[in-house]
Amino acid sequence: MTGPDRSPGATGPQREGRCETTAVGKPTAKDVAREAGVSMATAARALGGYGYVSPATREQVLAAAVRLGYQPNDVARSMRAKTTRTIGFVGADIVNPFFANAMRGVSDVARQHGFDVFLTNSDERLDLEQQAVRALLVKQVDGIILAPTGVGDAPHLRSVVESGTPLVFIDRALADVPADSICIDNVAAAETAVGHLLALGHRRIALVAESPVTGDDARCPVTDDDEWAARSVPDGVSERPDDRVIVPSAARAHGYLRAHRAAGVPVDSRLARRVPRYSQEAARDEVRRMLALPDPPTALFASDNIMGLGTVVALREAGLTMPDDISLVTFDDLDWTAITTPPITVIRQPVYDMGAEAARRLLARVNGDTSPPARVELPVRLLVRGSTARPGPRSS
């Protein structure tokens, strides 16, 4: 849901529908009461989390607050006698098994400490992320765990930190937001995966990775580390980004390139084109294109489980057998990777542990930990299975 324009630069009272805002355009509790059609006292109880309000009325008030973009007054929040014993989790794509497993870790730790978790999904969209954060703040959660949708400016997340609400990033981090983050070293993990293929003797290794950009650049091949970095950040950012604060797919592409550089093996640009959409189908189509080349790859590196699944589908449709015809390494040790024939070589991320550690870190902040924000990198492991071997006769 989206509400009327409440730009900070608005002057004078505004009336849109039933809502009348203050001179600076920020909705007040009075505005929320009017929008919800309840008394000011009822709205105050629902927004403040005290006194009795029927569940239906509370949801009615909270929905109105989200529509208007209302945020609780910082002073009022600080005067609250109790916590709500709730935290929020904003996943980037909760259909992706990665976030489902991370959520399990968050929930288990939260439950052990007597906290409930509100689950929301940004679907990798900034507008939905902003809406989810507003909704969680209105519900007065004690803290938020979030996988940011991108690496650009995020004033809505800085405002969360500035309001005193603890915030912890998972899987990704933002350089300009002072918050804890729980991640892995994506560059090193990808270097390990591609290094394994190079050590087996593969020299034509294809990259199957989500594009960190959209539009005309989405399919551009990138065979230079700095060029990929430049395309991994929003327009107007000229400096090479920190590998630790760019999206995982771009960081893993850096690892792919660095592994080749370390081995002195050039990258064929036709094997390093980015998948233009984040879907299994788009990954399958890109792998099909590379398999149709006059000199196709002898191995593939898929940057996550969605890219990996699309790759496996393409190989089966092409009638290719792993590892005799082609080798494959992918990210994420999901159930399907162990039951395919043969089982897939993977980079195992400690996904459950990432969620659990994010929850522990957040609850420490809720309980008063004021130490400087920290980046926690959990170790990964290469699990060598039957999908990788030395190049077979097909590649000679």
Image: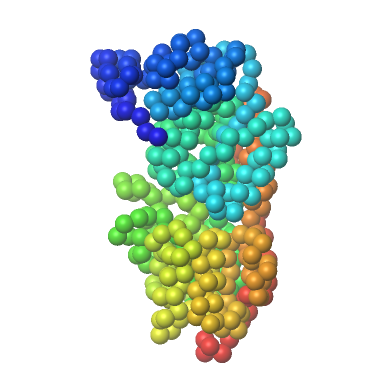
Q: Residue at the spot x=54%, y=77% of the render?
A: 316
Q: Residue at the spot x=43%, y=65% of the render?
A: 282
Q: Is residue 188 left or right of residue 238?
A: right
Residue 200, position as x, y percentages in the image: 61, 78
Screen quadrant of the N terminus:
top left
Residue 87, position as x, y percentages in the image: 60, 32
Q: Is residue 226 left or right of residue 306?
A: left
Q: Is residue 179 above or below residue 345?
A: above
> Which residue reaches farthest right?
112
Which image quarter: residue 348? bottom right
Q: Is residue 300 above or below residue 359?
A: below
Q: Residue at the spot x=53%, y=72% of the render?
A: 313
Tally of marks: 0
Q: Residue at the spot x=71%, y=29% of the render?
A: 114
Which image quarter: residue 267? bottom left
Which image quarter: residue 32? top left
Residue 143, position as x, y percentages in the image: 58, 30
Q: Nearer the viewer, residue 280 or 75?
A: 280
Is residue 187 visible from the viewing direction of this image? yes
Which colour assignment does the render follow? Answer: rainbow
Q: Nearer the viewer, residue 29 or 126?
A: 29
Q: Is residue 344 above or below residue 171?
A: below
Q: Is residue 239 left or right of residue 15?
A: right
Q: Nearer the viewer, residue 116 or 164?
A: 116
Is residue 161 visible from the viewing direction of this image? no
